[in-house]
């Protein structure tokens, strides 16, 4: 059984067939009025299109439909064949948004992205880990990761994108990193409906590539948006049951993140850049950094300072017991690691 969040979405091709259900008289009449040849079938109706612009125009012509019909109407696009089990039916509202943001949706469905690696260093400035960050492929559509995920959320593709991004990061790590180097991979808790089911693809990818689960740290983003802490605890438990560590991002960005940190007790605590910036000169930031570090150490977590750009920031964080650091001071995200992943030399 596959839940809606774990569904597979087929890319929308330049030509094919759009299937619609249910096929009301108003729907068929409006399509015919706009010059489309409608094919009726047992599930609903279908219209062939020869180019993407024609499909987009067709969806726009349906806007005058009564609200009740629009709310009940679903779409499925195929290469011409009848819809199969693997195909996904999309509600009209989300399908309209997919057409409106087609460039970004195309990036998501065709997986036109890659993973860059940013080094994470220890007290001695030796690289001990990398965080994997989503980036456009060379020559592809430019995007900001937040923009891509926001489009995915609006169009019902955020679970698909989150799973694909995790897979991309794991596969990139297998290509470039030796065993023993930690790999920090982001995930969206809102994309995981049933942890055992929704994460099985991630665990299978790690097994397929003969990687060590203990090298992975899955890092929850959206920390400030977490409403269901119990659900996130269950996600953490499933990761840990497979030998994988977990991390919380953006800790210190708000009071709620400290409460969540105490309840969740992650293996790694990543402190928000806002507390790191010029922390060597700000007594209030220093006090808060020391408090978070001590709290994390009390339940056995390692602490990572994000966004370090100045050596003075690194020295202060190191001196108060923060074990790991990340930021432009040590290297920008790049397509590949140094020749020796444990080296201090970063490709420019």
Image: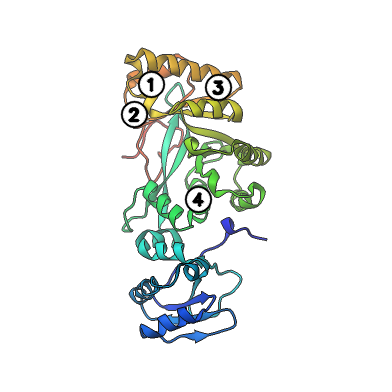
What is the number of callouts on the image?
4
Q: Position of residue 123 (x, y in %)?
A: 45, 21
> Which residue matches tag 3?
296
User: Compared with residue 247, is residue 63 higher up or lower down, i.e. above or below?
Assistant: below
In the displayed structure image, the side of residue 210 where residue 148 appears, left or right: left
> Which residue matches tag 1?
314
Dot 2 or dot 4: first in sequence order is 4
Dot 2 or dot 1: first in sequence order is 1
Element under disc 2: loop
Q: Position of residue 113 (x, y in %)?
A: 41, 54
Element under disc 4: helix
Write the residue at 45% across / 62% down: 94
**Cβ atoms under marks 2 and 1 closer than 8 Å:** yes
Write the residue at 33% across / 18% down: 312
**Cβ atoms under marks 3 and 4 closer than 8 Å:** no
Dot 3 or dot 4: first in sequence order is 4
> Which residue matches tag 2?
329
Q: Nearer the viewer, residue 95 or 218?
A: 95
Q: Quadrant of the N terminus?
A: bottom right
In the displayed structure image, the side of residue 337 where residue 246 appears, left or right: right
Dot 1 or dot 4: first in sequence order is 4
> Which residue matches tag 4?
162
- Marks 2/3: CA–CA distance: 24 Å
- Marks 1/3: CA–CA distance: 18 Å
Crowding near the residue tagged with mark 3, few <14, some 14–19, many ≥20 C-alpha atoms within 10 Å: many
Please name which of the two marks, 2 or 4, marks the residue nearer to the observer.
4
Write the residue at 52% across / 48% down: 170
């Amino acid at each position: 059984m596959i839940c809606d969040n774990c569904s597979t979405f087929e890319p929308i091709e330049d030509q094919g067939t759009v299937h619609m259900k249910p096929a009301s008289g108003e729907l068929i009449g409006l399509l015919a009025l706009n010059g489309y040849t409608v094919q009726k079938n047992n599930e609903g109706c279908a219209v062939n299109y020869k180019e993407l612009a024609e499909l987009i125009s067709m969806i726009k012509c349906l806007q005058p439909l009564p609200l009740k019909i629009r709310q009940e109407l679903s779409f499925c696009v195929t290469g011409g064949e009848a819809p199969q089990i693997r195909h996904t039916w999309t509600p009209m509202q989300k399908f309209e948004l997919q057409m409106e943001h087609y460039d970004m949706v195309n990036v998501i469905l065709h997986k036109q992205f890659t993973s860059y690696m940013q080094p994470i260093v220890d007290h001695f400035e030796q690289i001990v880990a990398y965080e994997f960050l989503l980036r456009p492929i060379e020559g592809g559509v430019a995007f900001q990761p937040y923009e891509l995920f926001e489009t995915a959320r609006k169009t019902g593709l955020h679970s698909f994108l989150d799973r694909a991004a995790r897979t991309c990061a794991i596969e990139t790590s297998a290509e470039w990193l030796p065993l023993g180097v930690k790999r920090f991979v982001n995930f969206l808790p809102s994309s995981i409906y049933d942890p055992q089911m929704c994460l099985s693809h991630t665990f299978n990818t790690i097994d397929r590539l003969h990687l060590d689960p203990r090298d992975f740290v899955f890092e929850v983003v959206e920390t400030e948006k977490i409403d269901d802490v119990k659900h996130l605890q269950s996600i953490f438990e499933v990761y840990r049951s497979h030998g994988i560590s977990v991390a919380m991002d953006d800790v210190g960005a708000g009071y709620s993140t400290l409460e969540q940190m105490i309840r969740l007790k992650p293996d790694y605590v990543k402190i928000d850049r806002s507390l790191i910036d010029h922390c060597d000169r700000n007594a209030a930031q220093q006090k808060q950094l020391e408090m978070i570090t001590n709290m994390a150490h009390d339940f056995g977590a390692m602490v990572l300072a994000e966004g370090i750009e100045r050596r003075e920031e690194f020295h202060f964080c190191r001196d108060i017991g923060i074990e790991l650091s990340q930021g432009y001071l040590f290297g920008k995200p790049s397509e590949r690691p140094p020749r020796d992943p444990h080296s201090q030399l970063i490709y420019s």
